Amino acid sequence: MKQYSIALAIVLASFLSSAQEDEKDFGQITGNFQTIIQSYSVDTIIGIYPEDVPDEKILSNSYLNLNYTKGKFAAGIRYEAYLNTMLGFDPRYDGHGIANRFASYVSDDFEVTVGNFYEQFGNGLILRTYEEKTLGIDNAFDGVNVKFKPLPGIKLTGLIGTQRYYWDRAGLVKGLDAEINLNDAFAKMDTSLTRIILGGSFVTKFQKDMDPFYNYPENVGALAGRFSISRNAWIVSAEYANKINDPSFDNGNIYKNGNAQFLNFSWSKKGIGFLVSALRIDNMSFRSDRSASLNDLTINYLPAIAKTHGYAATAMYPFATQPNGQMGFNAEFFYTFQKETALGGKYGTSFNLNYSQVNALKTEKIIVDPNAEVLNLNGYTTDIWAIGEELYYRDINFELQKKISKTFKFSLTFLYQDYNKYVIQGKDSMIHTNTGVLDMTFKLSSKHALRWENQILTIDKDVNGNKKDYGDWYMSTLEYTFSPNWFLALTDQYNTGSTLHHSAHYYYVAGGYTKGSNRIQLGYGRQREGIKCVGGVCTFVPAANGFNLTLTSTF
């Protein structure tokens, strides 16, 4: 793969060079670059011992995307260097080279891409490949992707490829997707206020059965259907997915079919709106390799049903979507009190209220009779309409945003959580937290601004009267901005400690300079260990102490 990638890169570089030399053969070059460099030091107070510090002392992750477009043609490469891979990322990334390369042709009704590409069918319940560098995820396909619009309102997509597996490839995935916009397809519906979109997908993976004990299915298929109906301020959308028996490491090698249902219902107009979502998942782990785990070789994407929080304290206990089974709901309401009203004041006031809850499925375990002529290896049965008693996650939060004057504004956030740490992280028990955040911004002049952020998280006690996990947290951040180029930030996160962890200050200071699309940031301090999640997909982040330097550029 590397030899082929390097050869393609040389051809592309030659093509770019000739295009630049000949003014008549013009094109456009775009790209971006990022490098993150982190040093590591011993810090026994936060649990970093000599054996936890890498021998190199300094590690780095770097990426360069280079794209060329000319008319209907586009090509690109991505160079990556992990020298060596930063802690918290899989060490199988160690090394450097051209990780992705592609070429594509796009016309009005037809598009073809060869090489590496990303794709999503519907909400991703049976297929979504994507890149999320903060989690170390890149499950890009390597193959062929074709899109075709045979008639107005109709889109067809077909693909075949293997998946990226660090510096290698694995699995074989094939997929078809069809979508029809009824308003564009039928002239009589063109002016209708009701907009309807229908879609359907089929995805299959192939993996040889080399196991001497299990009789694994070599071809595993999944089907999905979806719709979206909107009219004025109303939007209703839903998707149903079904996957045939797919015994794997994730589900304990059971042969039960999997399914998922995702429903969204929303209404909004200026200053007011609400959203209600429901997501049921039953045995829907879908990977191109049945033995893979963590975030490796995922074919599909199971959306997050709980709200994604942005502050350090509110995001300390994020929910990770449970592919083996969950039933979740989310409801959100927002309202803006208008200007010059009692609650709106001179500048208006925004209010957001959110509630989410995720429970286990109601299941009944199947007892296998070893004397039966045919063994029932489905593992368990479920009632699609029933909700399990075990609580995985509950989140009640509200946010108030208020501008007091031209020079001062603030936001106030409160969050209550029930967090089943045993289910989500595989350790400890249920945790209950209360979190408050006060975020204030002072505009000192046209170019100078000061932001002061204060956060408090309190946690419940165990049966012995001791605080659970790390204990309570108190956090404060001061950020000074000198527009348009400079900023300086100072943060301290303090936990009161518990029987398992010592109390500690997690201090961090950072400064940066931005000019145009270029940014440099230098920081020093402690990083707490924990779980980082993006859209319900999570990874573990270890504790760290040291300097870090980040460079980013877009061109």
Image (cartoon, rainbow, N blue to C red):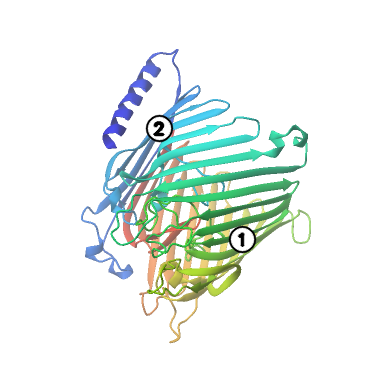
Q: Could you say where residue 288 lies in the image, as x and y percent from the top left?
A: 39, 50
Q: Nearer the viewer, residue 95 or 277?
A: 277
The amino acid beneath tag 2 is: Phe
Q: Earlier in the sequence, mark 1 or mark 2?
A: 2
Q: Secondary structure at mark 1?
A: strand
The amino acid type, in three-letter code, at marker 1 is Ala
Direction left: furthest residue: 55
Q: Which image quadrant: the C terminus?
A: top left
Asked whether, in this view, residue 408 is left or right of residue 283, the answer is: right
**Front in this rendered view, residue 424 or 298:** 298
Which x, y percent locates residue 113?
Answer: 45, 32
Residue at (46% x, 37% y) in the render:
517
Q: Which mark is residue 278?
A: 1
Residue 338 position (above or below residue 15):
below
Q: Say if 123 sits above or below 398 in the image.
A: above
One can see residue 399 in this view: no
Q: Which residue is mark 2?
A: 102
In space, the residues marked 1 and 2 are separated at their CA atoms by 37 Å
Using the image, tell me which numbered label, if any, was put on residue 264: none
